Amino acid sequence: MLRAVEYLGKVGVGVTLPQFFRAHDGNVYVVKFQNNRLSSRVLVSELLAAKIGEIMGLCFPSSDIIEIDEQMVNENPYLLELGINQGQHFASHYLEHAEYVGKDRLAKAINVPEMAGVILFDHIFHNADRAKNQKNLLLRLEDEKYKIYAIDNSHLFRSSRWTIDSFQKLGTRIKIYYFQHYRNLLKDLLSPQDFLPYLDIVKKISNEQIEYIVQEIPSEWLPDQPDRLALVEYTKMRMGMADEIYEKLCRFIPKSRGGQRWLFAK
């Protein structure tokens, strides 16, 4: 767990009003608060994504729980104005000098194949937001080479306010998010083979690993045990659908790259 040592100010974008903090490890983080305007389930989704993303080796910025104490809140009037509580919040490593990925810049990144893992993850967890929001993919110059990072996992399960009832409504539904960057990736850049390493990892994630990840979620973010159990069971079920999701994604990859889509198909 991280510990906040310095408040650095507003991020300036984001409906959850994230803020910059420096943690005890010396790094700067974008922090979302448990009492943000959407709900604490935003943090639950973010932590779940961070833990599973780490196992899958996805190009997510490193993230963790961060502790903000009462003294830091009291010493910063804006945090008091926001009504921030002391306690545990969610922190994602801030990527300096990164910029949004434009349509014609995807191919410049050296890690384009890693986006296959992100796309698979997003379809397992119903994360339509990244496909539709062009601000959730960043391009960063590192050692004279560009690298893509995927950020913001606040809308897993199609909503920042998912419930047991919404899990039941989503069920086993598979919808392919063929929008903007994802359209370009599937149509022009990725092959079925790019998905296979990530598919293999997902299939090896055990039920015990999923249960442990959910157990790590702070009780103040998700206090009700029935919600935790529902999250565990729905996550297990969706991850068990990885093969089926992969097969449907391949329908949007052209036959010329090993997929199932004719170039003239609409």
Image (cartoon, helix red, strand yellow):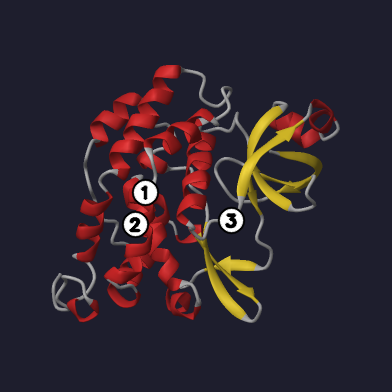
Q: Residue 230 placed where, x, y %?
A: 36, 26
Q: Which mark is residue 204?
A: 1
Q: Which residue is mark 3?
A: 61
Circle 2 sits in a helix, a strand or a loop, which is it? helix
- Alpha-carbon neighbours of circle 1 within 10 Å: few (<14), some, or many (≥20)? few
Residue at figure coordinates x 20%, y 81% from the top left: 256
Amino acid under disc 1: Lys
Residue at figure coordinates x 40%, y 60% from the top left: 117
Residue at figure coordinates x 51%, y 24% from the top left: 222
Residue 83 placement, left or right of 45: right
Residue 110 placement, left or right of 247: right
Residue 109 placement, left or right of 97: left
Q: Earlier in the sequence, mark 1 or mark 3?
A: 3
Q: Which residue is mark 2?
A: 200
Circle 1 sits in a helix, a strand or a loop, which is it? helix
Could you tell me if the residues under marks 1 and 3 are in contact, i.e. CB atoms within 8 Å? no
Q: Nearer the viewer, residue 154 or 206?
A: 206
Could you tell me if the residues under marks 2 and 1 are in contact, i.e. CB atoms within 8 Å? yes
- 152 above or below 59? above
For the C terminus, which image quadrant?
A: bottom left
Amino acid under disc 2: Asp
- Viewer-nearest of discs 3 and 2: 2
